[in-house]
Image (cartoon, rainbow, N blue to C red):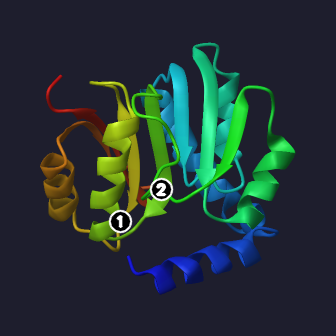
Amino acid sequence: MQRKRRLQIIEYYNKLSSVYEKLYGEEQVAKYRVISRRVSPRGRIGDFGCGTGLYLVELARNRNVEMVVGIDASIGMLSKAKEKKNEAVELIAGDICLLPLRPNSLDFAYSITVIDDAETLYTFLNEVKDVLRSGILVLGVLRKSLLSSENIEKIVNDCGFKISCRMDVPTVKDIILVCREENE
């Protein structure tokens, strides 16, 4: 994605941050419920594009979760997430396509309603592959309207991941994919 477009998106979310949960909170929580029924996170978790932190706190409450790192490019969204933060949550301003994390530092990664184009998905998956410990679960959520299922699956496979679970729930606007590195 071009730099100008990225900066426009960041500015959009900075402005939206004060009303984001009022506008989209219920929709996002519905996605988290679907995910939580099927995925049991453990260890060190990355929430990439964490926004206002709606899911961060839920993840951090899980007794199998050591810590949650939330990364978002919008300072406005991160300031809202900071209001919810507890000792198990760390927040970082950063780009999901250039993750400011050490290799092999996470056990799980989440990105919910963040990626909406092929270029970003490809770059993101390669970044995530670097920061995840080998063979560990990745969860990606992609908007149905902007990427075809076939294109998503091809990019996921090209980046060395295998889709182990696909959740296409009619009441949720996103396709939810659970992926593993192929070599595992």
Residue 38, image x, y percentages = 42, 29
Q: Is residue 1 visible?
A: yes
Pick the front one: 48 or 127: 127
Residue wearing tag 2 = 96
Question: Disc 1 marks which residue?
Answer: 120
Examine the image and state in which quarter residue 173 appears.
bottom left
Q: Position of residue 80 (x, y in %)?
A: 80, 56
Say which residue appears at 57% left-offset and 83% top-offset: 8
Residue at left offset 62%, top offset 18%: 66
At a point 32% along the width and 59% down the height, the residue shown is 123
User: In the rendered image, is residue 168 in sight?
Assistant: no
Disc with the residue nearer the chain's start (2 vs 1): 2
Asked which quadrant contains residue 155, the reply is bottom left
* Residue 22 position in % (x across, y down): 77, 64
Binning the other alpha carbons within 10 Å of mark 1 as few (below 14), some (14 to 19) or many (20 upward) gives some
Q: Pick out the residue farthest to the right.
A: 83
* Residues at discs 2 and 1 in contact (Cβ within 8 Å): yes
**How far apart in space, not on screen, are marks 2 and 1 (Cα)?**
9 Å
Q: Quadrant of the C terminus?
A: top left
Residue 34 location (% of width, % of height)? 49, 39
Checking the image for residue 98, the label placed there is none
Q: Quadrant of the N terminus?
A: bottom left
Q: Amino acid at mark 1?
A: Thr
Please tell me which residue lies in front, 121 or 29: 121
- Dot 1 lies on which element? helix
Is 121 left or right of 15, judged from the image as shown? left
The answer to which of 9 and 174 lies nearer the viewer is 9
In the image, is residue 110 above or below residue 124? Answer: above
Specify the quadrant of the image occupied by residue 115.
Answer: bottom left
The amino acid type, in three-letter code, at marker 2 is: Ile
Residue closer to the observer: 79 or 141: 79
